[in-house]
Image (tube, rainbow, N blue to C red):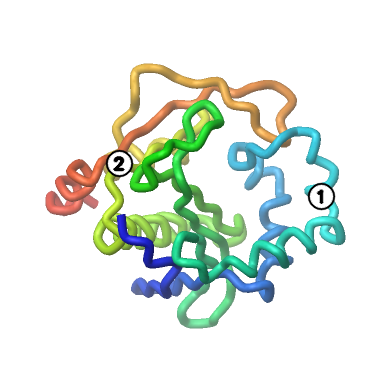
Amino acid sequence: MKFLGSKTIETERLVLKAQTMDEQHYLWSVLMLPEVNRYYLTVPKKLREKLKDWDKQKEFYASDMLKANDKDVFRWSVFLKDTGECIGRVSCQEAKNDGYEISNPSYRGVGWYIDPKHKGHGYGKEAAFAMMDYMFDECEIDVILTGAAVINKSSWSIMEKYGFERQDKTKMVEYTFLDEPVEDYQYVLTKEMYYAKKNSKVK
């Protein structure tokens, strides 16, 4: 794997940029929406109330932004190209297995969210696959491991359409803002699978 960091990526309609503090309050406010965080956040439940308080979170974000341009960090804020408006976030982090990081850095996890007011335009898909193009093509990662709540069909159906392979076993996941564990499908996308799907030009 090549550690190239969160370089700026442009698509037809979007610009993905390394994160700055300027947009973090907005992104936090989006992340606090139940329809966004319900099947996204997996930090310990004991942090629920702290997460809801921007004054408490601001210090964490400020510290995190100090590393935003490090070469081993792959997190982007997503902006509309025509207006410059921030609409969401994408990331590609080291993969985890049952809560433990996998030692091979070329095995990655992914995550993304888009402000619900921009739903229905395909921005999330466009941003996510621009990020995966970069990670596979330029950073030369080998595998993406990820999951999606069984009940969250809108998420896992996109994964399957674009070549992610569903594994035989599901996994119970503790989501931060849900009281009970949720069953998740587990998915794998290897570099070979990714290129096969990309070269088939299936849309």
Please name which of the two marks, 1 or 2, marks the residue nearer to the observer.
1
**Coordinates of residue 24 in the picture (x, y in percent):** 68, 66
In this view, the residue in front, 27 or 76, is 76
Residue tagged 2? 161
Label 1: state its secondary structure: loop
Q: Residue at x 80, y 34 (%)?
A: 46
Q: Residue furthest front?
A: 103
Image quarter of the N terminus: bottom left
Q: Residue at x 68, y 57 (%)?
A: 30
In this view, the residue in front, 190 or 38, is 190
**Coordinates of residue 152 in the picture (x, y in percent):** 52, 33
**Coordinates of residue 71 in the picture (x, y in percent):** 45, 66
Q: Residue at x 58, y 26 (%)?
A: 173
* Vertical relation: 160 (above or below) 55: above
- Which numbered disc covers residue 52? 1
Label 2: state its secondary structure: helix
Residue type, mark 1 in image: Lys
The part of the image, by quadrant, that contains residue 192 is top left
- Say which label, 1 or 2, has the lower sequence index: 1
Q: Residues within 10 Å of mark 1 (few under 14, many from 20)?
A: some
Q: How many marks?
A: 2
* Vertical relation: 89 (above or below) 82: above
Q: CA distance from mark 1 to mark 2?
A: 34 Å
Residue type, mark 2 in image: Lys
Q: Residue at x 79, y 40 (%)?
A: 47
